[in-house]
Structures are given as structure tokens and as C-alpha cells.
Amino acid sequence: MRRSVNMTVNGQAVSGEIEDRTLLVEFLRVNLSLTGTHVGCDTSQCGACTVHLNGTAIKSCTLLAAHADGQAVDTIEGLADGETLHPMQEAFHEHHALQCGFCTPGMIMSAVDFVNNNPVPTEQEVRHGLEGNFCRCTGYHNIVKAVLAAAQTMREAG
């Protein structure tokens, strides 16, 4: 069965015709060509598909697109302000936390939500907060440094 969905993605109203079984990650990648959201496992284990739904990090590989109907979705493509990177994106660049880049969009989206909810995290809290995101390149040390640096920048920006 097909249905129409309407949502706001990265601040823009979008709509599409989808099958009932269409996952949000598929809608974003296929229907909207927003390929920064990756599919890594299809079981919500790796976090590569993380986006924000109404401001909260979720794994889009386990949410039906129909459940996002009428909601606000933000992807990695909408995180920067034009040419100005979000502080988390900038910190990942500055602290060499990018590695191969496959996990990076989901890791950044999870980290932004984490820091929004915990603006003064410890290293251990960052490690625990990002447990649902896997980096197969084992680059966690620089990822943690980047999140801590971004948290400070985000606090200072107010």
C-alpha cells in the first residue's frame, strides 16, 4: 500500500509517496537524495543512520517514514549554517575524528544531541553517550576529543 507523507527536513517542507514499509533512512536517501545518512547494519546497532527527529537523535533505519509524517527531521546536510560548519562538525575536522567518514554523520548527529542534553560532559560520559555509534576504524580517541572540544565551543556560543 502507498501513502503520502509530509514532513520538514532540514527546515524545508517535503512530501512524497511511499510504501507503508519505507524506512525513514530510505525516504531520506532515495526520495530526497540526502545520502549523508548512511545504512550500516539495518538493526539500529551501528548508529550510521542517526538523524534528529523533533530535535532528538534517533536511528532512522528502524523508524518507518510514515511515523515521521508531520514531524521535523534534521540530517547531517542541514547541520551547517551555509558555509559555516556546526561546532561539532568543525571539531571533528580539527581533531582528526573523521577516519574513513562512514560513521561520521551519525556520530556527529548523536554527539550534537548528547551535548545539547549534557553541555559539560566528562570524557567517560562522552564515551558512554556515544555507545550506540560504532566506528570501525577505531578512531574513538579523537572522536571523544572532538566532542569535548565542541561542547566547550557550544557552551561559549551560548
Image (cartoon, rainbow, N blue to C red):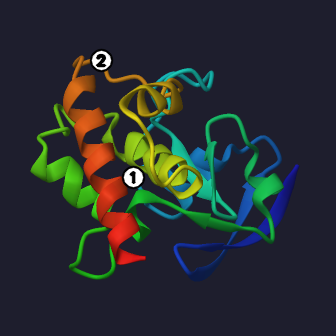
- Label 1: which secondary element: loop
Identify residue for label 1: 35
Q: Residue at x 19, y 32 (%)?
A: 142
In the rendered image, residue 109, in percent from the top left (x then y), is placed at: 46, 50
Q: Nearer the viewer, mark 1 or mark 2?
A: 2
Judged left or right of residue 57, residue 84 is: left
In the rendered image, residue 47, in percent from the top left (x then y), is placed at: 50, 32
Q: Amino acid at mark 2?
A: Arg
Q: Residue at x 40, y 40 (%)?
A: 107
- Number of marks drawn: 2
Placement of 32 over or under 35, stated as above or below: below
In the rendered image, residue 84, in percent from the top left (x then y), is placed at: 23, 77
Q: Amino acid at mark 1?
A: Thr
Q: Quadrant of residue 154?
A: bottom left
Placement of 109 over or under 33, stated as above or below: above
Identify residue for label 2: 136
Of the 4 image quadrants, the one containing the C terminus is bottom left
Residue nearest the viewer, comparing 138 with 157: 157
Tell me how far mark 1 sits from mark 2, CA to CA.
19 Å
